Image (spheres, rainbow, N blue to C red):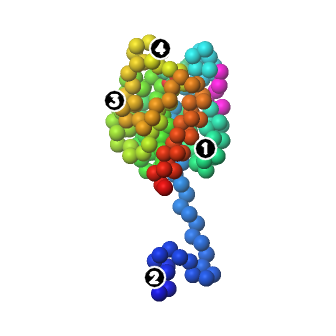
Amino acid sequence: MAALAQYNGQRKPGEREKPLAKARPIYVLNGPNLNLLGLREPEIYGRTRLSDIEAAVVARAATHKLDVTFRQSNHEGMLVDWIQEARNEASGLILNAGAFTHTSVAIHDALRALDRPVIEVHLSNPYARESFRHHSYVSPIATGVICGLKEQGYLLAVDALAKLLKDANA
Ligand code: CA2
């Protein structure tokens, strides 16, 4: 009977609770030139620095008890490597692939292999801009897309991802 109780996950008197496995962080990946945020073109991208967005995202994720891995790269292959890493290390992905959104079949293919919820984020609204920004290689793979809301879009993406992960684990 004792063995059965253990099998059912019940603790015996005096037995210590096993620590819960730590939840995987959400990955927030940022593409080329986003390191320049707040330094140029504030009328399009806002005045907030990427480091400020990171701090706000970490704080918002903490309200959902989620950890964050926040990164930026100007290199397509680096982003592909991180998306591949996310397959084992992340619970979900928020991706602003920058200009690679409109060009990268490699990022598209890496996302296809990622069996995790993906929220595509853009600070600006690409559909209100040049026609070359109207196509996204990310959108067909994304669970959801948020654009045009500047840095607030990242925080809405955290909330959306938290809800998707909660519902998936319910
Ligand atoms: O609106 C977005 O978040 C974009 O992903 C930003 C990309 C652009 O290529 C996409 O079409 C839309 C560009 C990021 C460049 O960020 C800069 C920030 C300050 C100064 C210059 C570039």
The mark closer to the camera, 1 or 3, is 1
Secondary structure of residue under mark 1? helix
For mark 4, what is the residue? 129
* Disc marking residue 105: 3
Residue range of the region highlighted in magenta in the rendering:
47-52
Which residue is found at the position 48% from the left and 50% from the top?
Answer: 167
In the picture provided, is 59 more to the left or to the right than 72?
Answer: right
For mark 2, what is the residue? 4
Residue 32 visible, this angle: no
First in sequence: mark 1 vs mark 4: 1
Q: Is residue 121 magenta?
A: no
Q: Does the residue labelled 4 lie within 8 Å of ligand 1?
A: yes
Which residue is found at the position 40% from the left and 19% from the top?
Answer: 134
First in sequence: mark 4 vs mark 3: 3
For mark 1, what is the residue? 61
Q: How far apart are marks 2 and 3 (CA)?
A: 52 Å
Secondary structure of residue under mark 2? helix
What amino acid is at disc 2?
Leu
First in sequence: mark 2 vs mark 4: 2
x, y percentage for residue 78?
Answer: 45, 35
Which sits in the foreground, 32 or 123?
123
First in sequence: mark 2 vs mark 1: 2
Q: Distance between the residues labelled 1 and 4?
A: 30 Å
x, y percentage for residue 141?
Answer: 37, 35
* Disc marking residue 9: none
